[in-house]
Amino acid sequence: MSDHGAPGDDRRTETARRQVSRAVGHTVETTSFFGSIMAGLLVGWVADRLAGTDPLFIVIGIVAGFGVGFWKMWVDYTKATDDRH
């Protein structure tokens, strides 16, 4: 019995590993983006409760969370592309 698999198994295994790695990376980025928006919403909601305004700080928080989330994704993307070169 041989310890080696069929020719091409290593290549298929490496391809599958890369695909899983990319999928996990996208999931982390998506979760981080969504988390930034939710954090902005939560901070805005608390600020609205404390200030007695409604929905001023919620809207500001969502927009700020979107901006921060997009910025974080951009930084991660540029790091990933810089690492490849």
Image (cartoon, helix red, strand yellow):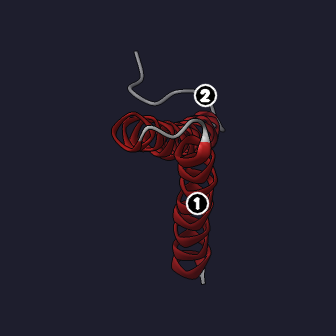
State whether residue 84 is above or below residue 34: below
- Name the residue that disc number 2 marks: 6
Depth order, front residue of 41/25 = 41
Q: Secondary structure at mark 2?
A: loop
Q: Quadrant of residue 45?
A: top left
Q: Residue at x 33, y 39 (%)?
A: 50
Q: Secondary structure at mark 1?
A: helix
Depth order, front residue of 35/9 = 35
Q: CA distance from mark 1 to mark 2?
A: 40 Å
- Name the residue that disc number 1 marks: 73
Q: Is residue 53 left or right of residue 67?
A: left
- Label whose residue precedes the other's in the sequence (1 or 2): 2
Q: Quadrant of residue 46?
A: top left
Q: Nearer the viewer, mark 1 or mark 2?
A: 1
Percent x, y for residue 39? 43, 41
Percent x, y for residue 28? 49, 41
Q: Residue at x 52, y 74 (%)?
A: 79
State whether residue 11 is above or below residue 13: below
Percent x, y for residue 70? 62, 60
Amino acid type of the residue that numbered disc 1 sits on in the rendered structure: Met
Crowding around mark 1 (Cα neighbors within 10 Å: few <14, some 14 to 19, many 20+) is: some
Amino acid type of the residue that numbered disc 2 sits on in the rendered structure: Ala
State whether residue 2 is above or below residue 41: above
